């Protein structure tokens, strides 16, 4: 199993329940695909470095997890097709 970290920015105009549900949905994808969630760190609303979709703030969250090599591609696919997520990045923490 490889250590990964996913950072994503959720649309700040969503209701609080939908923001929490989006974070939970990412965790469910990780566990459903055979991964293990290690840590969830919700940063909350933060200013963006530049406007995205005419928005200047975003709801940030970081999830550390362990998974096989195929899970990041599936997680990336699901985050791309959801309108709730403005940006995301998946990082392999084991790579040097």
Image: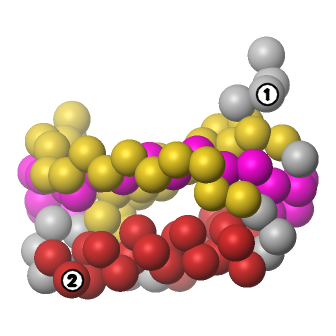
Residue 81, image x, y percentages: 53, 81
65 vs 95, left or right, is left
Query: On screen, 96 above or below 49?
Result: above
| Label placed on residue 94 | 1
Is residue 90 visible in this depiction of the protein?
A: no
Quadrant holding the C terminus: top right
Question: What segment carries the magenta color?
Answer: 53-73
Residue shown at 26%/83% (left/top)?
Answer: 18
Residue shown at 21%/83% (left/top)?
Answer: 17
Is 81 contained in the magenta span? no
Query: In this figure, which residue is indicated by the disc labeled 2?
Result: 17
Q: CA distance from mark 1 to mark 2?
A: 33 Å
Residue 27, image x, y percentages: 55, 69
86 vs 36, left or right, is left
Mark 1–mark 2 CB contact (< 8 Å): no
Residue shown at 67%/68% (left/top)?
Answer: 30
Within-10-Å neighbours for mark 1: few <14, some 14–19, many 20+: few
Residue 56, image x, y percentages: 10, 51
Task: Label 1, secondary structure: give it.
Answer: loop
Q: Please, which residue is most extreme toward the top here?
A: 96
Earlier-in-chain disc, 1 versus 2: 2
Within-10-Å neighbours for mark 2: few <14, some 14–19, many 20+: few
Number of marks: 2
Residue 73, image x, y percentages: 76, 63
Q: Main secondary structure of the magenta part?
A: strand
Query: On screen, 32 above or below 59?
Result: below
Front residue of 18/9: it is: 18
């Amino acid at each position: 199993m490889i250590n990964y970290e996913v950072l994503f920015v959720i649309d700040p105009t969503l209701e609080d329940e939908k923001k929490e549900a989006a974070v939970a949905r990412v965790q469910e994808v990780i566990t459903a695909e055979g991964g293990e969630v290690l840590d969830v760190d919700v940063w909350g609303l933060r200013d963006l470095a530049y406007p995205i979709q005419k928005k200047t703030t975003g709801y940030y969250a970081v999830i550390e997890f362990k998974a096989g090599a195929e899970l990041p591609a599936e997680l990336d696919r699901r985050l791309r097709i959801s309108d709730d997520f403005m940006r995301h990045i998946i990082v392999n923490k084991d790579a040097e």
